[in-house]
Amino acid sequence: MCEHDAFTHTPGSGHGTTRRTLLTGALAAPLVAGVSAGSATATTTVTRWVKPPYTDAYPAMQVKNAVGRLGEAVPVTGYFVNTTWFKITTGKMAGTYVSGSGLTTTNPATQTFAYPSPDPFSLPPVGSRLTRYVISRDFYVSTRASASFSAARRTSIAPRTKVTGKLVSSDWVRLDDGRYITTALLATTPVVRAFNGRVPSGRLRALPAYLRAPSAAASSLERVAAMQFIRMDTAFAKVFGYHITVEEGYRSLYWQKHWYAQYGAPRAAYPGTSNHGMGLAVDIRSGAGSPFTFGTAADKWLTANGAGFGFDRSWWLDQGRPNAEFWHYNFIG
């Protein structure tokens, strides 16, 4: 139902060869605006917020062996050890260190944005060259060897990356380096809060009724993501004889606010930042009796085969993490 902003990671985890390698961001030495060197003392406790799209937490003051990831707009309380490192002193990440450059004095979730015009998802005629940005909240997306989801997955691209290439179909862009990326993961702006939770209905596709859990009156995903989920379910059903039932796909800004008011961070994403708000995340059946819980045959199949269809459960949601969610999958292309 909900989506976490704070995560814990044990290095070396993963689900075999289908899992992508996640890269940690580079640290910048200067502090963010509004944070003076005078505040970098163990006697001054302050609260800051994570800048988009995320920041990694480390057990010591070095970029090595990340133990967690904090999504954008997550509040952290602690102190600046020096002009580079901030030590968290409260919560599940207490005792870990994050980059001062990854924090801000203003909660990013409180910013307001006008919906971009023209539509950020609009595409030029097929054959045109275009420049777009990868729209993802905190997860890397995949490229393919050709314009097909059956093609081999190539290297991943980080959130907000600017890409250029040629539109070869309504679903695919051939990047200048020869890789292919689905248009489902691209927009004219990297500022996802400008449209998160307000995605035009024409970009969404309702999943068939047989894929909806009893608790889901309706579920939609971004058009390409929906088609790939249906294909994944078809392959799954041939093996197990039942469907991958969905509790929630696209989540409007209204429902993001609803869940955040009910659960707060880190269990629920800040309104306007959820992967669900772009139609690029899906929650499958959860709760007692779910056949998809960690370690079941269905769970093992999804973690081994999901990425081939473009769906992946991020490592910080894996079994054993503080905020583990077996039900949450992102569309990564």
Image (cartoon, rainbow, N blue to C red):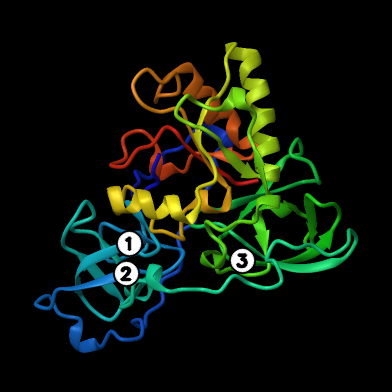
Nearest to viewer (mark 3 / mark 1): 1
N-terminal of the pair, mark 2 or mark 1, is: 2
- At mark 3, the secondary structure is loop
Residue 65 visible, this angle: no
On-image quarter of the N terminus: top left
Q: Label 2, on which residue?
A: 49
- Does 142 appear above or below 40? above
- Does 140 appear above or below 226? below
Marks 2 and 1, how far apart at CA: 5 Å
Q: Residue at the location (44% across, 18% down)?
A: 291
Marks 3 and 1, how far apart at CA: 22 Å
Few, some or many residues within 10 Å of mark 3 (<14, 14–19, 20+): some
Q: Label 3, on which residue?
A: 161
Residue 67 is situated, as x and y percent measured from the top left of the image, at 32, 51
Q: Residue at the location (45% across, 68% down)?
A: 26
Q: Which mark is residue 330?
A: none
- At mark 1, the secondary structure is loop
- Cβ atoms at labels 2 and 1 below 8 Å apart: yes
Residue 287 visible, this angle: yes
N-terminal of the pair, mark 3 or mark 1, is: 1
Residue 203 is situated, as x and y percent measured from the top left of the image, at 69, 51
Amino acid residing under circle 1: Val
Amino acid residing under circle 3: Thr
Q: Label 1, on which residue?
A: 74
Nearest to viewer (mark 2 / mark 3): 2
